[in-house]
Amino acid sequence: MRFHTLVGILPHEREFAQPLEVDVIAQVAVQAGIAAVDYRQLYDLTAAAAGRGTGYLETLADELANDILAIPGVSRVEIALRKPHVPLPGPLDHAEIRLVRTAEPAEPAPERAEVRPNRVGVRHG
């Protein structure tokens, strides 16, 4: 997914929106009739988190992981955030952070089906 948002700690990054690329993989526990996640819900949660802006990619990934793990049936989430325009003195394609978070199991682990929301976005480099 791609968004334009305020991301970064430098003064110009807090004033001017810049591109942010997001990959989300949600793993769903097949239980109680829940075998899939509505991709629109993943997109909406991601758009809302990106729209809030942040100083650090890590903060945004943490907030988004909490939001996604609150979806019924989601047992694990992987998030990758890429910031293509990083103000560093040398060549750099992008800055990227990855976060993997697992929900606290309420019961013994059931069978799992993985849902990959098409990884909307483009990998550069």
Image (tube, helix red, strand yellow):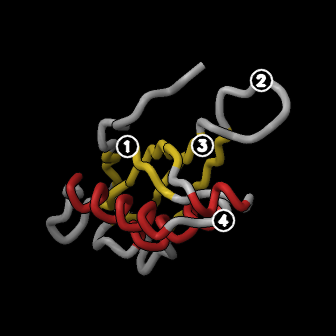
Q: Which of marks 3 and 1 is in front?
A: 3
Residue at 41% x, 48% y is: 3
Q: Which of 3 and 105 is in front in this view?
A: 3
The location of residue 8, given as percent across then percent down, is: 67, 57
Q: Mark 3 points at which residue?
A: 83
Q: Determine the secondary structure under disc 3.
A: strand
Q: How crowded is mark 2: few (under 14 residues within 10 Å), some or many (20 or more)?
A: few
Check disc 3 and give the amino acid type: Lys
Q: Check residue 55 in the rendering and tell me which mark sits there, or answer none.
A: 4
Identify the residue shown where x is 30% and y is 43%: 117
Which disc number belongs to residue 1?
1
Residue kind at label 2, given as amino acid type: Pro
The x and y percentages for residue 96 are: 65, 42
Quadrant of the snapshot with the C terminus: top right
Q: Label 1's element?
A: loop
| Residue 60 lies in quadrant | bottom right
* Amino acid at the residue labelled 4: Gly
First in residue order: circle 1 vs circle 4: 1
